[in-house]
Image (cartoon, grey):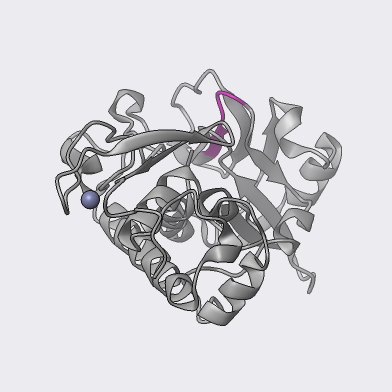
Amino acid sequence: MPELPEVEVLKRHLAPLLKGRTIHCVQVRRTRVIRPTAVRTLQRTLCGATFTDLSRRGKFLVFTLRKGQSAKSIVLIGHLGMSGRMYLLPAEAALPKHTAVLLDLGGDRFVFEDTRYFGRFTLDAGVIEKLGPEPLSPEFTSDRFAEALGRSRQPIKIKLLDQRVVAGIGNIYASEALFQARISPSLSAASLTAKQVQDLRNAIRQVLNRAVECGSTVPLDYDRHEQRDRLFYFGRAAEALESYSERLYVYARAGEPCPRCATLIKRRVQAARSTFYCPRCQGRRKM
Ligand SMILES: [Zn+2]
């Protein structure tokens, strides 16, 4: 599932391609992804509108558009869900089977492809209002983080996936950040010391920044489905390195030696999702 870095890289890729482009026609093939917006509302709102900006909030893409002389901008929210992809295709290219929404931009088409329909492409911006701070912004301070973790007795790994605590972290980067900060994924959120909270906050920023940097240097190719990477769901060009997952230290590496101490990485299931950690570096000791 795409997390903050993947969405950020996608945003950087799409922003210059969309800016100034006008939507001529909107086709919705899977109504589920535009909920709660109705098909006719989406079509009426977007037809004739021009993209003015694209930003990211957590794992959400925030498209801003404007129509004619209207001073009021239109906000469109996109979410890749489990395996969604967004890209431009030449008008004459064949459409992928799982096209959920299609925007005719004249010349080429913007495609939102979603094989499992867990994604979103909607005018309802309510979902982003409930999000916690952006981890890479100055507002994500150790104090604010400590406050959000509060007195929760939930394991810290599960708490990190709560988008109200901090926006944009998913299963992959939660494991990576905890490894980086040497914190056991099973510790209850409330039991973290002030130093651990600070270390974890710094680790989150480091891990996400590194992933964004890494992803930004990879040539993307949206037409080549078979080149899809385990992490960058939106596709990677054929010439890009195969060893892309090398930058992950613990995620999906159960049974492999810890890069720090050579103890074998373990996998544990927490809230029905896999957590990867080093039992030695991330022991339960408190500092
Ligand atoms: Zn280790």
Residue 40 placement: quadrant: top right
Q: Nearer the viewer, residue 212 or 30?
A: 212
Residue at 60% from the left image edge and 39% from the top image edge: 104
Q: How many marks?
A: 0
Query: For the view shown, which residue lies furthest in the front direction?
Result: 285
Range drawn in magenta: 110-116
- Could you tell me residue 48's position as x and y percent? 71, 52
- Could you tell me residue 11's position as x and y percent? 47, 56
Q: Is residue 238 left or right of residue 189?
A: left
Quarter of the image where the C terminus is located: bottom left
Q: Nearer the viewer, residue 84 or 99?
A: 84
Q: Is any atom of residue 240 visible in this view? A: no
Tell whether position 206 is magenta: no
Q: Is residue 185 above or below residue 131?
A: above
Q: Is residue 50 above or below residue 111?
A: below
Q: Is any atom of residue 64 visible in this view? A: yes
Residue at 53% from the left image edge and 18% from the top image edge: 97
Q: Is residue 8 left or right of residue 40?
A: left
Residue 99 placement: quadrant: top right
Residue at 55% from the left image edge and 64% from the top image edge: 191
- Could you tell me residue 247's position as x and y percent? 23, 49
- Could you tell me residue 20's position as x and y percent? 55, 62
Residue at 33% from the left image edge and 60% from the top image edge: 182
Q: Is residue 173 above or below residue 40?
A: below
